[in-house]
Image (spheres, rainbow, N blue to C red):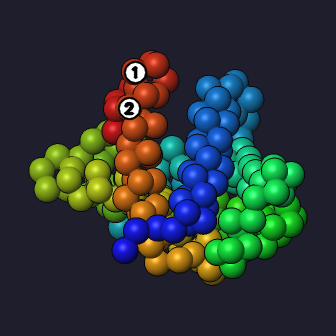
C-alpha cells in the first residue's frame, strides 16, 4: 500500500522540518558560541571504565535542533493553514501552530535521544567519538547511525499525534536516506571530516 496524497504532504512536512533543524544545527556547531555549551550529556561519567556517551554528545546539540524543529513545525503549520491546505487534519493531526510546536518538540527530542544508545555502544566497544568502528560493529553502527534518530523521532511523534502506517514505513526509509545524504553533502562541503 502506498501513502495517500495527504500522507505524502505529511511526509514532506516532516522531512522539511527536520532538514531545517539539521541545517540550523550544522551552522550552530560551526559557531564559536557553540563551544560555550559543549557540556557532555554524560557529565564525564563512565560505565565499565569507559565513558557513557563521550565528549561529542553535548547539551549544545539540543539547544538549537529541538527549538528549530519545533518552530519549523509551527511555521510550516501556519503556512499550510495560510494556503488553505487541510492535509494535517485529514491524517488526524491538529492544524494549530502551537499544537504543532509541541508535536515538533516531541519528535525532535525523540530524534536526539535516540542517538544516545548508539554512542553508548561505540564507547563500550572502545570506539572513540568521531572514529569508525571496525569489523562487524562498523556495519551495525552504520545502520544505527542512519536509522536510530529517525526511529526515535517517529516513536515520539506517534505518541504526540497519530502517524499512518504507510507514513511510518515511508519515513523510516526516506528519512534514513536523507540523513545519509545530508552527511555526504556536509562531507563534500568540508563541514564533516567523514561522510558517514
On the image, the x and y values in percent for residue 57 come to 54, 50
On the image, the x and y values in percent for residue 46 come to 46, 62
Q: Secondary structure at mark 2?
A: helix
Residue topped by disc 1 = 188
Instruction: Examine the image and state in which quarter residue 66 appears.
Output: bottom right
On the image, the x and y values in percent for residue 179 come to 44, 46
Q: Secondary structure at mark 1?
A: helix
User: Which residue is nearer to you in this view: 152 or 79?
Assistant: 79
Report the residue at 20% width, 53% height from top. 139
On the image, the x and y values in percent for residue 31 come to 68, 25
Report the residue at 70% width, 24% height from top. 32
Q: Is residue 82 above or below residue 46?
A: above
- Quadrant containing the N terminus is bottom left
**Marks 2 & 1, CB-CB < 8 Å contact:** yes
Q: Is residue 101 above or below residue 184?
A: below
Report the residue at 29% width, 51% height from top. 142
Give the number of the disc on residue 66: none
Residue topped by disc 2 = 184
Label 2 Cα neighbours within 10 Å, binned few <14 / some 14-19 / many ≥20: some
On the rendered structure, is 144 left or right of 109? left
Residue 186 visible in the current orientation: yes
Amino acid at each position: 500500500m502506498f501513502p495517500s496524497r495527504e500522507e505524502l504532504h505529511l511526509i514532506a512536512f516532516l522531512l522539511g522540518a527536520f532538514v531545517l533543524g539539521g541545517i540550523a544545527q550544522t551552522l550552530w556547531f560551526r559557531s564559536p558560541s557553540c563551544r560555550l555549551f559543549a557540556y557532555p550529556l554524560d557529565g564525564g561519567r563512565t560505565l565499565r571504565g569507559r565513558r557513557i556517551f563521550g565528549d561529542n554528545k553535548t547539551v549544545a546539540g539540543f539547544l538549537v535542533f529541538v527549538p528549530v524543529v519545533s518552530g519549523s513545525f509551527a511555521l510550516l503549520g501556519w503556512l499550510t493553514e495560510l494556503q488553505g491546505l487541510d492535509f494535517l487534519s485529514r491524517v488526524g493531526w491538529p492544524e494549530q501552530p502551537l499544537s504543532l510546536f509541541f508535536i515538533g518538540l516531541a519528535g525532535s527530542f525523540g530524534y536526539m535521544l535516540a542517538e544516545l544508545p548508539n554512542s553508548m555502544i561505540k564507547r563500550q566497544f572502545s570506539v572513540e567519538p568521531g572514529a569508525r568502528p571496525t569489523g562487524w560493529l562498523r556495519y551495525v553502527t552504520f545502520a544505527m547511525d542512519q536509522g536510530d534518530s529517525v526511529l526515535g523521532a517517529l516513536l515520539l511523534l506517534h505518541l504526540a499525534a497519530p502517524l499512518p502506517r504507510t507514513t511510518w514505513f515511508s519515513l523510516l526509509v526516506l528519512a534514513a536516506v536523507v540523513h545519509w545524504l545530508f552527511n555526504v553533502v556536509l562531507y563534500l562541503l568540508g563541514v564533516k571530516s567523514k561522510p558517514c
